[in-house]
Amino acid sequence: MIRDMLIDDYPQIIKLWRSISGFRIRSIDDSEEGIRRFLARNPGISKVVFVEGKIAGSVLCGHDGRTGTLYHVCIADDFRRRGLGEAMIEAVLESLKKEHIHTVNLIAFTENTGGNIFWQTIGWKKRDDVNYYEKVIDSMNTIEIC
Ligand SMILES: CC(C)(COP(=O)(O)OP(=O)(O)OC[C@H]1O[C@@H](n2cnc3c(N)ncnc32)[C@H](O)[C@@H]1OP(=O)(O)O)[C@@H](O)C(=O)NCCC(=O)NCCS
C-alpha cells in the first residue's frame, strides 16, 4: 500500500532513515518540525509504502512550481528488489503530474552503486553536463551520516 506521507508517520520514518546506510540526515531539515514545514508546503506528493502495516519505504518530494525534487528515497533492507521502490516513485510522479510539474530531479551520491543502477533501470537520465552547487545558509543545519 502506498499513500501520502503524514507528519504522524515521522517517528517511523526517522527510524527508517537512520537504518539506511549512507543516508545524510540534516539536523534542521529532517527534524520533525522541518518535515512538518516541508509537508505543509508540499502537500500530497511525498509518499510512504506500507508492508504488513508497517512503513517499509518513503520518499520526500517537493516542487517550486516548475521542477520537482526527490529526497531520502528509500526502501528498508528487508523489502528491496520487490518493485516497491519503482512503484513508490511512480506514485510520486503521478502526484507531480497532477500539479502540472513536468520535470523531476534528485541527487544520487556517486558512490551509491545500487541507487544509481536503480535510477537508470527505471528510466531516469544521468546528467553529465551540469555541476551541482550548494550553499548551507544556516551552520546549525548539520549532517549526520548513517
Ligand atoms: C534504491 C532503492 C530505493 C531501490 O528500492 P527497491 O524497492 O529495491 O527497487 P525496485 O525493487 O523497485 O527495483 C527496480 C529495479 O531496479 C534495479 N535495482 C534496484 N536496486 C538495485 C541494486 N541495488 N542493484 C542493482 N539493480 C538494482 C533492478 O533492476 C530492479 O528490478 P529487479 O529487482 O526486477 O531486477 C533501495 O535499494 C534503497 O532504499 N537503497 C538505499 C537508499 C538509496 O540508495 N536511495 C536512493 C538514493 S539516490
Image: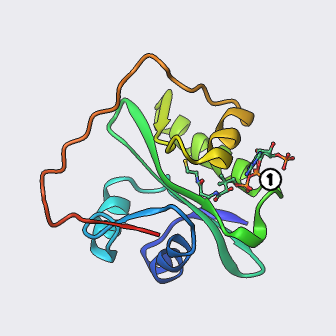
Answer above or below: position of 5 versus 126: below
131 versus 22 height, above or below: above
Which amino acid, by three-letter code, is at mark 1? Gly
Q: Is residue 4 above or below residue 61?
A: below
Query: Where does the image place residue 110, in percent across and percent down from the top left?
Result: 52, 40
How crowded pointer 1 is (Cα within 10 Å; few <14, some 14-19, many 20+) is rated as few
Looking at the image, residue 86 sits to the left or right of residue 143; the answer is right
Q: Residue 113 versus residue 100: which sits nearer the camera? A: 113
Counting from the top left corner in percent of width and height, residue 137 is at 12, 51
Q: Residue at x 80, y 53 (%)?
A: 83
Mark 1, residue position: 83
Whether the residue carrying mark 1 lies under 8 Å from ligand 1 is answered with yes
- Answer with the quarter of the image where residue 49 lies: bottom right
Q: Nearer the viewer, residue 10 or 81?
A: 81
* Left or right, 87 with reference to 32: right
Residue 28 spot, x, y in % from top left: 25, 68
